[in-house]
Structure formats: C-alpha cells, structure tokens
Amino acid sequence: MLFNSHLFIFLFLPICLLGFYRIARHQTEWALSWLVLCSLFFYGWGNPAYLLLMLASIVANFYIGTAISRGLSLSRKKIYLLLGIILNLGFLAYFKYANFFVDSLNYLGADYHLETIVLPLAISFFTFQQIAYLVDAYQDDAKEYQFLHYCLFVTFFPQLIAGPIVHHREMLPQFLQAKISVNWDNIAIGLAIFSLGLFKKVILADGVAEYATPVFSAAETGVEIGMMEAWGGSLAYTLQLYFDFSGYSDMAIGLARLFGITLPINFFSPYKALNIIEFWRRWHITLSRFLRDYLYFPLGGNRKGKFNRYRNLMLTMLLGGLWHGAGWTYVLWGGLHGLFLIINHAWRSLTQHSQIRLGVIGRVLSYLLTFLCVVVAWVFFRAESLDSAFNILGGMIGLNGVYLAVDTELWLVHLFQGLGIEVHLNELSSTFIDEKSMRWIGWLLVVVWFMPNTLQLMQKYQPAINLEQFSPEPGTLQITLNQKFAVLCSLIFIYCVLSLTRVSEFLYFQF
C-alpha cells in the first residue's frame, strides 16, 4: 500500500486514525494493539507471505533483546548479541544478496543455479532498526519486556517501509504517554506536512521522472547517449530522487504527527551542502547515523591514524552502497562517495591550520563541485548495469556527440543557414530532451537551491526530532498555521489527489 494512493488516503488512514483515538478513550494498550494490527495490515497488503517473515524476525529479535537486557554476564550478553547480529545479517543476506553473489560467481566462471528470490518490502530498514535495538540493549541504552510495545517500535507504518531508522528511546516514550487524546494542533501540523510531501512526490518527483527514465532505459539497450541527453537525464534523475525521498520523508513525519508522534529528521536540503561531508549529514540522516554508530565507530573510526580512518570511511561507504542494492553499480556508488569523503577529510586536514577563508565565489564553487560529484555518483545509483552507467558518463563528457533540444536546434539551424552554413537536423537532434524538460529541470534546481524546505517552513512547530542540529538560516520563511494556510494546503491536497491517475512507488521502497 502506498501513501500516494486513493486507497491509503481515503480508506486505510481514516479508519486507522479514527479507530486509534476512539479506542484510546477506553484503554491505551488496546489503542496501541489497534495501531500494530493496522501497521501489519499495511505491510502485508502487497504480499501477505512476507508478513510472516517480518513477524518471525520481530519475534526472534524480541526474545534475543529480552535475554540481553535481563542482567546476564558480559560474556553471555556478547554471545546473544553476536547471535542476533548473525541472524539478522543472514536473513538480510539471503533475501537481498543471494542472487547477486551467485550471479557474480557465475560471471567468474562458476555454474550455480538459484531461483530468483523476491526481495521482501522494507527488509533493510526493519533489519537495521532491530540490529540497532540489540546493540542498544547490550549497551544498556534500551530495554523492552513487552512484546506489543516492541512490535509497535518495529512496525509503526509511517516509518516502516523507507525509514527513518529510529531508536527505541526515540519512539516508545512518546507512545507510552499517560493519556492518548486528539490534539488538533498535531492534526493540523500533520496534514500540512503530509500535503506538502504529497505535492513533492506526485507533482514534482513523478513529473520530472518522465525525462529521466527514457534516457537510462535507452542507455541500457545500447543507444549512445549524447551530451545534452546525458546531462538532462542525469539531472532529471537527481531531482526525481530528491523530491521522491524528500516527499516520502515529509509524508512519514506528517502521518506520525497525526498520531501525536514526532519522528527524527531524515532529510534536510542535501543539495545545499557545501561539501560531501555536509551532504551526508543532510541526506538520509538516520542511515548515516546508523552507519557511523554501528559500523564506522566499531571499525575504529578516526582513532588510529589517518590511514585507518580513510580505510574505515571507504569500508563504511562500500557497505552503505551495498545496503542500497545488490549490484556492482551500488558498490561503485558507495565507493565513489567513500573516495569523495576521503578527499574532503584530507583537504580539511591540510587546511585546518591555514588562514584560507572561502569568499562568495569560493562558496559558490564549493556548492557546484559538491553537486557535480553527487550527480555523477547518482548515474551509477540509477543505471541498471555498469555498461549503461559508462554510456551515460561518456555522453556527459561528450564522447557520444552533442545533441540539442529540438527548439534550440531549429534556432541554430536558421542561424547557420543565415551565415551560409548548411546544417542538417539529424546532426543536432536530441531524442529525449526538449525545451519543456529543460524548463522543468531549471525550475526544480531553483527550488532545491533557493527555497526553504518543509521542516524550515514548519520550524516553529518542532516538526522533527534533532532538527536543532541545523541552525535556522537567516531570513528563512516560516509558516503560521491559520485559515489562509489551511486553504492553501487544501488546494494543494486536492490538486495532488486529482493528479493521482498513475500511482508510482517511492524509489526507496526497493531498498
């Protein structure tokens, strides 16, 4: 079931929300039970068989976590923690990576056969969340002895499918407040944020997707992609992914707020980052936190010299790339970001004692260089194979020729003909990129770089946990909930619902 579907918006969500507050009048635990049942129904809607797999994972992790929390000796706790991590990673490895490893071995000359394994929805998210819980339990940062509460922590539907990856201590205290009752401020805030997120997904992300998909599909079939098509397709995907994930993050925060729950911040204008280090503090923030706390730090972090620090950064990003998908394109994407981070940290180390200060031009160049690195890396993230990725990258540097949009080409043809130079259309024509797509991309870049994000607009209402780590930008527009804004959100919501002629999945659902 998708957030951007009529079924979810007009049937599932109203029933779940009304039932939750109705039942909470009588008994809080019953209301939480209702929310767990609704969340399980939400997850099992597409493929009920995988609901059993998720429940098996929840039961196993709950009992391992309970055992760790019951005051065992340190050695016993380590055994249970190791068992839990092996169980979770084995579960993830089989369903997500078994086909990838077999295909890789066969490519090297082996001859193994394995039936295609369908990836269970959200397996990476709920597996990582439970690994974090086990580690927190081992470190005495989390304890949970009630199965119902643990189920709610894992399955809460607004963040179940694509995050954020939450900690037990961030969520359960909010659910276990003394009395659950309707808070109309929370309802207004939640609906506003949800509507803005829906607009990002339905209008912006899905709107620009039609310019990215044909380019990458053509590259996969072996069609040589020209420079304008390569840049147009890559920028279109860069913006599609941005608004798709930003829209999901907003919708998750808005939905949780309807139930009186504030989720952690997970996305904060990453294309405004001045460098790659800052980019990863803004993009998929809870995944970055998980990789830092449960992988980078255990590997040694930056405690054992520069070489080990850079090695740990690279290993963390390679595994982060593999987390996103079982393919060499994802590994290369992670490796590129690992390289970018190493260069960024090395540059900081070289300049930390100097008097270098970035002026306006220096900051603009830093923004553009960071954005360029991100766009190039996204080509591997989106491409279906290494060949198609290199096809597009070759086009971006002009190896496959330069083709222009039709309207631009006609203007140039008339110009050249006026100068007495004969030029034919098929020497210039771009198949996939036209003036309309160029305008879409241009306007969306303006929005990304110069407009405040949803959390900034709603900052006075504390829309997310840990938002304070981002200092308010001077002069940032902030919205006040009033009748005019309610009317605006209503119009946005109606426009989005009328545009739901083709329901598309969120891109992060595949991870």
Image (cartoon, grey):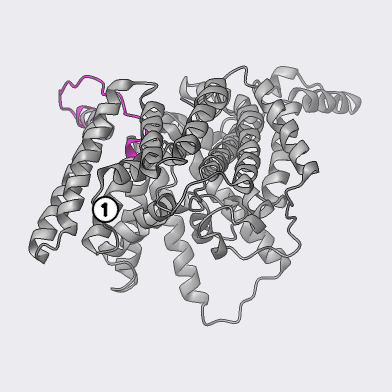
Image location (x, y in percent) of residue 267: 54, 49
Q: Is residue 282 visible?
A: yes
Which residue type does callout 1 highlight? Glu
Where is the C terminus found, in terms of image quarters?
A: top left
Number of residues whose C-alpha sits closer than 10 Å to that of mark 1, classed few (under 14), some (14–19) or many (20 or more)? some
Image location (x, y in percent) of residue 430: 67, 23
Question: Which residue is label 1 attached to?
Answer: 144
**Which quarter of the figure has residue 316?**
bottom left
Q: Is residue 104 visible?
A: no
Towards the viewer: 102 or 130: 130
Would residue 381 be counted in the magenta stretch? Answer: no
Image location (x, y in percent) of residue 5: 55, 23
Towards the viewer: 215 or 490: 490
Image location (x, y in percent) of residue 277: 49, 61
Give the structural element (helix, strand or loop) at label 1: loop
**Count of labels in the image:** 1
Residue at 65% from the left image edge and 49% from the top image edge = 453
